[in-house]
Image: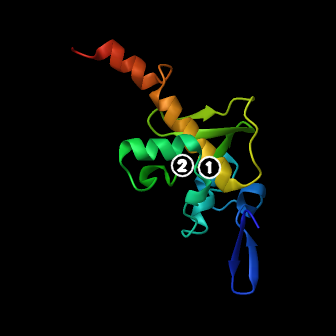
Amino acid sequence: MAGTQYRGSEIKDVDQFLKDSSGLDSDREKEIGQHIGYRYDVNLVPDYDRLTPFLKEYIEVMGWEDLNWLEDVHMGYEEGRPAVFDRNINGWVRVPDSIDLPDNQQDRDMIARELLIKFQMSDRHPLVMLRKAYMKF
């Protein structure tokens, strides 16, 4: 079953904390109004069978063997809309309405990783604008 993890005889829905807003534990969770999923199970590493074609090619071009810095990038929500957090600009990048998101959290996270990379490489990224404005050469 997608989105399900087994522990002994217990079946656990790994998306449960992302679906349920009750019992928010940390101050940050209360502030953003949702659970931070990876806090609950450190074994929830990305399933590499779910890589998007873009991410497969990106990893290959970069010469990497894994997602490393992208492993803690997850699909979240800003003002009720799907979004991914970009640490470089300290802000949320909203998912375009034209993208249909899958039900499985791991698939949504892969889409979030792809969107983040594409945004960071685009001319619309604020750091690109800063570079153009302040570069010396």
Q: Quadrant of the C terminus?
A: top left
- Name the quadrant of the N terminus: bottom right
- Of 48 and 101, which appears nearest the observer? 48
Residue at the disc numbered 1: 109
Instruction: Evaluate whether residue 12 shows in this view.
Output: yes
Q: Image quarter for residue 100?
A: top right
Which residue occupies 49% across, 36% down? Answer: 117
Q: Position of residue 68 (x, y in %)?
A: 43, 54
Circle 2 packing at 10 Å, graded few (<14), some (14-19), many (20+), is many
- Residue behind mark 2: 73
Given the image, on which type of amino acid does mark 2 rest? Answer: Val
Front residue (pair 63, 77): 63
Q: SS of the residue at dot 1?
A: helix
Distance CA(mark 2)–CA(mark 1): 7 Å
Q: Earlier in the sequence, mark 2 or mark 1?
A: 2
- Picture coordinates of residue 97, whole percent (x, y): 75, 29
Residue 17: where, in percent of width, then height? 71, 61
Tag 2–tag 1 contact (CB < 8 Å)? yes
